[in-house]
Amino acid sequence: MPPFLPSSRRNFLVGLGRFAAAAPVAGLLPAGAFADDGAKAYCPPPSAWTDLARKVSGGVLRPDDPFFGDVCRPNNLRYVATLPAGIARCVTAQDVQACIAWVKQQGMPFAVRSGGHNYAGYSTTPGLLIDMTKMAGAELIPGSDGLVRVLGGTLNNLVYKQLERLGRTITHGRCDTVGAAGFLLGGGIGFNMRKWGVGSDLLRATDLVTADGSLVNATAERDSSLFWACRGGGGGNFGVNTAFTLQTQPVSTVTVFNLTWTKDLPRVLRLLLTELASAPDDFGSKISVTIPSLSERCDKVGTTLSILGQLHPSKTTLKEIFKSTWELADHRTVKEDVAYWAGQDFLTETTYPYFYQEKSSYMRAADISEEAIAAMFDWAAKMPGTSMPSAFKFFQVGGAINRMGPTETAYVHRGFDWLFSVEANWWRPTDPVALVDANLDWQQNFYADVNRRTKAVGAFQNFPDPSLADWRSAYYGENLARLSQVKQAVDPGMLFTYPQAIRPA
Ligand SMILES: Cc1cc2nc3c(=O)[nH]c(=O)nc-3n(C[C@H](O)[C@H](O)[C@H](O)COP(=O)(O)OP(=O)(O)OC[C@H]3O[C@@H](n4cnc5c(N)ncnc54)[C@H](O)[C@@H]3O)c2cc1C
C-alpha cells in the first residue's frame, strides 16, 4: 500500500450516465485501426452503443462526456493512458449480463472496475470498462447472525459506514476508496486478520455473472469450487461478482497506536519482527521503513521506522507486547480504548492517484537474521530516490490466517509471520524516465536479495506486480492447478482475461 500522503482526499467526480448517440467520438479511429500509442482502437457502430446504453440502467459514458476522464482514471497513474472506448455504469446484475452479451457480440475486450485500485492497471482496457461503482450498498441480512450482503461495486467507505451503524466489523483495509470486490477476491488484509482471518476467510457466499452470461450464487454447498476460487483467486478471473455475503463480528472498543524510532533502526526492526510474532491475535500491526524523497534528503530527512496498529480488548498491554522496543521509541501516540470505528479514523489511509509499483513476499520471523536486516538498510541507503518517499513494509500476518490450511480456500499464503513489500513511488513529469527506471532496477534487486536472505516466498495477489516472472506460483502456489480447473469449467475461452489472468487447465 502506498504511504500516507498528507494531502486532501481526492474526490472523484462521478457523472450521470449519458450517451451522445450521433456525435462523432473524439480520438476514436475506424475499426481495427491503431491509436497513437499503438493500442488497437475498438469502434463498434453508433447503433451498437445506443443499444448498450438502452440496456444498462446507469447509462454508458463515451470519451466526449465531461466526466469520462474522472470516471475511468485508475489509482495507479502508470496506466492512465489506457482509455476505454466506453464506460458502462452497471446498477444491477442484469446490467452486467447485458454488458457480457454485448462484448461477446462486438468481439470487444473489457475490464471490470470497482475501486480502480489495482496496482498493475488490470482494471483498465481499450475496450468496454464495466464500471460497478453504482452497484453500491451493504445491508444486514434480516434474521441472520451478523451476515451482511455487500453489492459488487461498493467502495470500502460505504461498507464501513454500515458496519459502524451495526456495531460490527470484518477484516478490512485502511483505504476508504478501495473496492470491496477487489479487496475480497484477492484475500484482503487488514489489522483484524490475525483475529478473524483475511477478508475472504469471512466470505460466505457470492453472486457472479459468468462468461456464459448466467447469474450464479456460489456458496460452500452450491458451485463450491467456484466459491473456493472466489476466496483469494483474484478479481477479474471467473466472472463479475455482483454481491458478497460476509460474516461480520461484533466490536466495541480498540486501542490504536503509532510508534516511531529514529535511532538504532536495524536493531529495533529485528526486535519488532521477532518479538511481535508471538503477540496475541488481538494485536494487528504494520511496520514501515520510510525512505525519504530527493527533496527531503536535501532537508536532511533520514530513513525512519514506524509501526501503526491496533489492539482489541486484551489481558496483555501494549507495553508487554512491545517488550524492549517500547522504551526505545522516540514518539508514541496511543489512543486507548476508543470506540472501534473512531479508532479506524486514526488508522485510515488517505491517498490520491499517483505512479507506483509494489513487490511483495511472505516471511517467517525465524528466518529474518541480523545480516538480512543490515542488508535491508544498506539497500535503503542506495535507493536512487524520486520526488516521492517510498517504503519497505511488513504487514503482520499469522494468528487466525494460519489456522486455516493453504488449500482450504484459494488464498494459499498460510504459515507466515510477515507479508513484506517494497514500494517504488514517483511522479510525472517531475521524475525523468531514466530515474524511474533506476528506481525500478533498485526495487528488483532489493527484493531479490531480501527474498534470498530471508527465504521469503510467494507474493500477495492483491498487490499484483507486472514485473514478477513467476506470478502464477507466487500468487497461488499449490492452489494453481485447482484454480485452472475452475477456470476451465466456467470460462474455457478466457473471456475474462488480463496479463496475469488464471489460464484454463
Ligand atoms: C491506496 C491503496 C490501499 C490499499 N489498501 C489495501 C489494504 O489495506 N488491504 C488489502 O488487502 N489491499 C489493499 N490494497 C490493494 C487492493 O485491495 C487491491 O488492489 C484490490 O484488488 C483493489 O480492488 P478495487 O476494487 O479497488 O480495484 P479494481 O482495480 O477495480 O479491481 C481489482 C481487480 O478486481 C477486478 N474486479 C473489480 N471489481 C470486480 C467485480 N465486481 N467482480 C469481479 N472482478 C472485479 C478488476 O477487474 C481487477 O482485476 C490497497 C491498494 C491501494 C492502491
Image: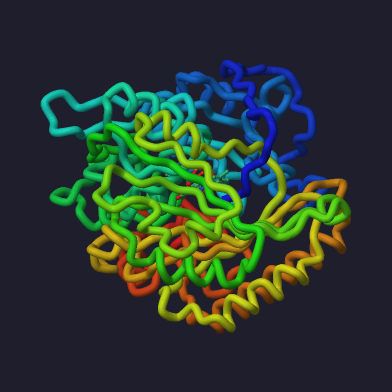
* Residue at x 33%, y 67% (from the top left corner): 414
Q: Where is residue 342 in the image (x, y as percent from the top left)?
A: 42, 29
In the image, taking residue 260 as reference, residue 152 lies left or right, namely left
Q: What is the basis of the colouring in this image?
A: rainbow
Q: How many marks do you count on the picture?
A: 0
* Whether residue 211 can be seen here: no
Q: Is residue 302 visible?
A: yes
Residue at 85% of width from left, 58% of height from top?
433
Q: What quarter of the picture does the C terminus occupy?
A: bottom left
Q: Nearer the viewer, residue 108 or 389?
A: 389
Above or below residue 287? Residue 143 is: above
- Could you tell me residue 143's position as x and y percent? 11, 26
**Percent of width and height locating residue 440:** 73, 66
| Furthest residue in direction front, as rendered | 327
Task: Point out the residue furthest to the left here.
Answer: 143
**Which of these two is toward me, 278 or 451?**
278
- 80 and 130: which is toward the camera: 80
Residue 270 % position (x, y) = 52, 72
Q: Which residue is drawn at 72% across and 20% down?
A: 66
Going 40% across and 50% down the picture, which residue do you hit?
Answer: 188
